[in-house]
Image: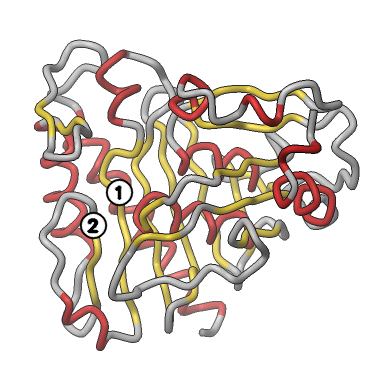
Amino acid sequence: MTNREAEEILERIHEALDAAARALEPYTAGAIEPEFKSAGDPVTEADRAVNAALHKSLLRPGEGWLSEESADNFSRLRSQYVWIVDPLDGTREFVAGIPEWCVSIGWTVNGKAFAGGILNPTTGERFMGSSQTGLTCNGKTAEATATSSLDGALILASRSEVNRGEWEQFKGGVYTVQPMGSVAYKLARVAAGLADATWTLTPKHEWDVAAGVALVEAGNGEAREPRGGPLAFNRESPLLPGLMACGPHLGEAIGRLIAFPASAA
């Protein structure tokens, strides 16, 4: 894609995030009753309202659509361009009134995360970027950190995973682990250099991470599967085997750590 085409996609994402923010206005984080899906995950009227706003704002003829809150339409598999969105990533935090949830919009081209936009309405942070144009945070140029050592690094971990004990194997390291909600928000913060890395060994859906992966790569960072494989999107099964994300020089150190977690302590 040309720079102009990338800028047009980012403008569409920007407008869609504005539409999402308007759709959220009737709802108050921490003061909304959730329902629960069959797998036990919460969902609210706000999730559905934002999903409708994003679908209306973004989708054009010939483009595919994959969203946590839409029934999957496998016609997307025939599309070169696919929107992969999570209307409200971090619904548990939204329900609890914890400001670690966001609206996440990813644009993929032939299975690659090309552009993304993530908005945290509570904090006012807006992360935008593409592999063609770079990354911005609230309109200012940003990029991933250049650190090459885990010594003193800030690692963002899933609050749910920490609560379940899945990060016990990473205790005692030379880095700081900060639990946080919303994998998309964690990825955005890593992309913009507000943290050094994040990873999860728990499978995640494409809508959880597509936008964040696009932002990490736009910020000159690295995002891949935990065992080193590339992340591919718009697959028939949208479940990924986890991921790691970091700046351009930290991947090797993290790879050693998460490949042999028993030796991390």
Find residue 203 and report its horizontal and vertical position in percent: 43, 51
Residue, disc 1: 86
In space, the residues marked 2 and 1 are separated at their CA atoms by 6 Å
Q: Are marks 2 and 1 in contact (CB under 8 Å)?
A: yes
Q: Is residue 155 left or right of residue 152?
A: left
Residue depicted at 47% across the width and 40% down the height: 183
Here the colouring is secondary structure
Q: Is residue 83 left or right of residue 195?
A: left
Comes first in the chain, label 2 or label 1: 2
Residue, disc 2: 67
State the image quarter where residue 8 is shown.
Answer: bottom left
Which type of secondary structure does the marked residue at label 1 adopt? strand
Residue depicted at 58% across the width and 42% down the height: 137
Q: Is residue 36 left or right of residue 19?
A: left
**Does residue 244 sit above or below 3 in this rendering?**
above
**Does residue 112 sit above or below 134 in this rendering?**
below
Looking at the rendered structure, the number of numbered marks drawn on it comes to 2
Type of residue at label 2? Ser
- In the image, 125 versus 229, the foreground residue is 229
Find residue 200 and report its horizontal and vertical position in percent: 55, 43
Circle 2 packing at 10 Å, graded few (<14), some (14-19), many (20+), is many
Find residue 86 and report its horizontal and vertical position in percent: 30, 49
